[in-house]
Amino acid sequence: MNIFLSILIYSFVAGLAAMGGVYLVYFFGARAKKSLVLFVSFAVGVLMANAFLHLLPEAAQTTALWPYGALGAIIFFYLIEQVIIIHACYEEGCETHSLGHMGLFGIGFHSLIDGLTIGIAFQAGFNVGLLASLAIVFHKISEGSCLYVLLLGGRFSQSKALFFSWLVALATPLGAMLAYFFTAQLAGQTLGLLLAGAAGAFIYISASDLVPLTHKEHNWKNGFMMLLGVGFILLISKFI
């Protein structure tokens, strides 16, 4: 499978995963919200394992400047979130519920970045791209449900919330295609910095957006699912 087809397929799968999260809340409501915490815990393990075991080592082999790429991405996301609130939130009293339009823009931007990450990761090789895509797929489930709940809380109708959720989901393959066409010729130090930036994004998303959500419900299942996420990446790495 060539790079273009891989990027196209896996970015659309990631977008569909986001809509899976949307429809979980749409059809199952409160029950889905409880189960989503387990998906979030699993996603934490997958994202962290990918960042530290694959993306950062791959970047380090390419450029000695990889720490600047990772740190730069973390700083970038921090500054963005100081302006636009895009943290996950499933509770009725969430402060973002009064910011439906801003949340829509913020998570839409986030979705675009996910697509860029997929496109960049596949430039480093199929294995790196596949693992990064899997990490994003699991994260997108919680992100999609977050967006849908946020839009409903922002007084969007169900039909409008679904429509805008689809638009945000499609931002992922759009970002992936942009990455393909603009980074296809990149190599060496620049590609290494971009890979390190993708790792920094994974670390920031895990530590800032997802981990605090899992700590709202203290039980052994969350810890188990996080470790299962790490184990999943270790296992998959043996076969690709």
Image (cartoon, grey):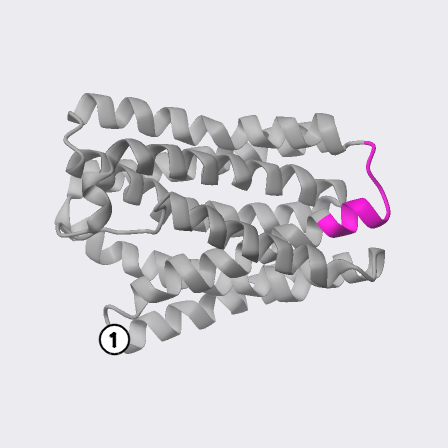
Q: Is residue 240 visible?
A: no
Task: Give percent across and percent down for residue 64.
Answer: 83, 62
- Boundaries of the magenta span: 185-193
Q: Residue drawn at (72%, 25%), measured in percent from left and top?
A: 181
Task: Give percent across and percent down for residue 197.
Answer: 65, 52
Judge by depth and name the residue closer to the eye, 19 or 213.
Answer: 213
Query: In the rendered view of the protein, which quadrant contains the C terminus?
Result: bottom right
Q: Residue drawn at (60%, 50%), measured in percent from left and top?
A: 132
Q: Is residue 138 left or right of residue 151?
A: right
**Furthest-bottom residue in view?**
220
Depicted 32 relative to depicted 181: above or below: below
Asked which secondary structure carries label 1, the reply is loop
Q: Could you classify mark 1 by the number of other residues whose Cα lies within 10 Å: few (under 14), some (14-19), or many (20 or more)? A: few
Task: Give percent across and percent down for residue 157.
Answer: 15, 25
Task: Give percent across and percent down for residue 202.
Answer: 54, 56
Q: Residue drawn at (55%, 34%), measured in percent from left and top?
A: 11
Q: Where, by quadrant of the figure, is residue 56 drawn? A: bottom right
Q: Is residue 212 left or right of residue 125?
A: left
The residue to which callout 1 is attached is 218
Q: Residue drawn at (48%, 51%), measured in percent from left and top?
A: 79
